[in-house]
Amino acid sequence: MSTGWEKDTKMRVGITYDLREDYLAEGYDEEQTAEFDSPQTIAAIVTALESHGCSTTRIGNVRELAARLVAGERWDLVFNICEGIHGAGREAQVPALLEAYAVPYVFSDPLTMALTLDKAMAKRVVRDCGLPTAAFALVTRAEEIGRVALPFPVFAKPLAEGTGKGISAESHIPSPAILEKVCLQLLARHRQPVLVERYLGGREFTVGVVGTGPEARAVAVMEISLLHNAESFGYSYGNKEHYEDRVSYHLADDAESRQAAETALASWRALNCRDGGRVDLRSDEHGRPHFLEVNPLAGLHPVRSDLVILSRLAGLDFTGLLGEILASACKRYSLAMPRRLQVAV
């Protein structure tokens, strides 16, 4: 009886994703679809997985996955990068569906996906684990704005968005009157609570992580510096969309950045994140990095996504990055890795 993949057998990997052009065609706007993927990203993932000895199937979004599962189609593993479009649990939909059909998959489980999309809930868990995160308040309706008891300046953003959506220069708020204006705008536009945090004026970092639990490691710490023509005060949606002209990225390796890596890994483990992703941090006035949020479903555009950029700066190319992510998932499920991947990692 064989205990692993036969010589000529390839691991069958399905790929789930949200294609941005599909949602644009349905009438969603550029900002609403900012987290979704391009054909270039999907093609790069296919090429990387196949270079590791996998046989790939392009599945598509959660509706397409559901139809294929009902029809009886299965895979050895699903490489899931679906962000979802509706609801606070949208990133948990594909993992939950795959678990219902007992299909192994890459990246975090439904609980972690739902928890981390809610930035306030993630901060509560991290805070309860003794890790630094800025003091915050949650505004769910207009009458709660006046109850925010934080020292100014503060920073406001939608509770459950990514890619800098809802963040602009106006997110930095110096007074109660401006807080009311910004919160009312965010509540109306994004139709979800607003997270208001004490503003941290120090350095901003993002830490790439690969692996799961005690085996997770920081790939690198990348510092994000805004250029003179960037929107002020934060890594906003506009700054991310035009990063070539507005943002400077460089690896950091000093005492403060090493502390950022330690906090990032502790947060990653506290939130039970798996396989690969990113943790965002910002330092206070004393140079102490604080947890901002975690992205357990980090973008994988082969050129412009932060996790890919910092990995490349650290000497880990796109194929190698995906190999480490794939190896972590295979180990979790006790799946025999494709032979090429065994050699590569």
Image (cartoon, rainbow, N blue to C red):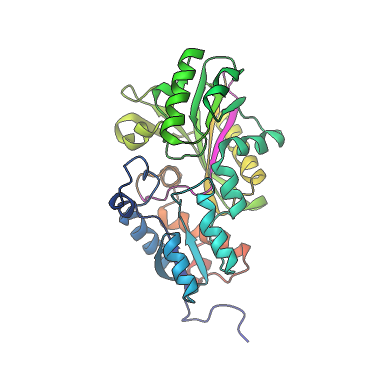
**Rendering coords of residue 325 (x, y %):** 52, 57
- Residue 41 occupies quadrant: bottom left
**Rendering coords of residue 37 (x, y %):** 36, 52
Can residue 233 be seen here? The reply is no
**Picture layout, residue 62 above or below residue 150:** below
| Range of magenta residues | 285-302
**Picture layout, residue 3 above or below residue 152:** below
Side (left or right) of 229 relative to 167:
left
Q: Which part of the image, by quadrant, shows the N terminus?
A: bottom right
Work out whether residue 106 or residue 51 is closer to the camera in this orientation and state it. 106
Queried whether the magenta region covers residue 328, the answer comes back as no
Q: Residue at x 45, y 16 (%)?
A: 178
**Rendering coords of residue 129 (x, y %):** 71, 37
Query: How would you classify the magenta stretch by its main secondary structure?
Result: loop
Work out whether residue 217 or residue 140 is closer to the camera in this orientation and state it. 140
**Rendering coords of residue 305 (x, y %):** 40, 45
**Picture layout, residue 192 above or below residue 331:** above
